[in-house]
Image (cartoon, grey):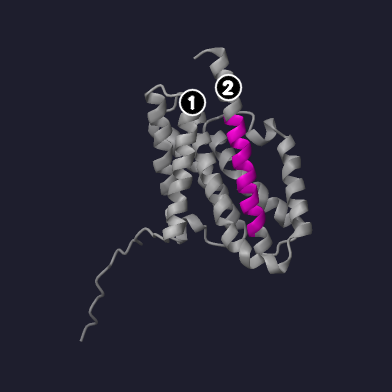
Amino acid sequence: MTSHAILNLSFLQTLVEVLATLAFALSGMLEAARKRLDLVGVYAVAGLAAFGGGTLRDILLDRRPFFWVEHATWLWALLALCTVAMLGLRSRHFELTERAVLWPDALGLGLFSASGTQIALNMQMPAIVAVLMGVITAVVGGVLRDIVCNEIPSVFRDHRPYAVCAFIGTWLLVLAQALNAPDWLGLAAAAGTTVMLRGLALWSDYRLPAWNPDPSPRRKPE
């Protein structure tokens, strides 16, 4: 790979992570607003949603510095976003907030999963490990957001495909790299597919079947 290509890929990865960070921060901020948390709570939940998955990915891959340390300016952007939102959001907005949070969350799912997978591939990780790093990057922030907001994480309870969408979409990035396709094309295909699958699941209200280990009811002894 030429130095020019490496520079373009680095810029593209940074851009993707910035967009994903803002999308997840927005989802965390909206969830905090729905729960009517105070200023510190809004900052904390937005930060966990934005940086939690990427931080765990970097810990597992022994990658330093963390994204939010390397790009500390985005911490200020996060603080500004939360402050403006708290000044503008009112109780009449909360009903719409619960539905609106699903779409920025879907965008962050696609962008973070693609970025996390690309980072792992750049570190010469096996394909399945890279895909799982992408899923971790995309899902853990939302899990932390819901736990702090005293909710069972939505990825585990609503049965609408979430992590599954990221798992399927990120394989397109692996395929694109195997076919020597342009880096931007692989990232766009993976992120776009994941967002599309999640969007279809929300639109159709499709739900994965719940595991029922005992489908036949036991007969009571007479």
Residue 126 seen in the figure? no
Q: Is residue 65 magenta?
A: no
Disc ID at residue 164: none
Residue at x 42% of width, y 40% of height: 169
Q: Secondary structure at mark 1?
A: helix
User: Would you say the magenta stretch is mainly helix, strand or loop?
Assistant: helix
Q: Position of residue 165 (x, y in %)?
A: 42, 47
166 is higher (above) or lower (below) than 185: below
Residue at x 41% of width, y 25% of height: 177
Disc ID at residue 8: 2
**Range of residues picked out in magenta:** 13-31
**Amino acid type at image mark 1:** Asp
Q: Position of residue 11 (x, y in %)?
A: 61, 26
Residue in the foreground of this view, choosing between 20 and 136: 20
Badge 2 or badge 1: first in the primary sequence: 2
117 is higher (above) or lower (below) than 193: above
Q: Is residue 183 left or right of residue 94?
A: left
Q: Are marks 2 and 1 in contact (CB under 8 Å)?
A: yes
Q: Is residue 56 left or right of residue 194?
A: right
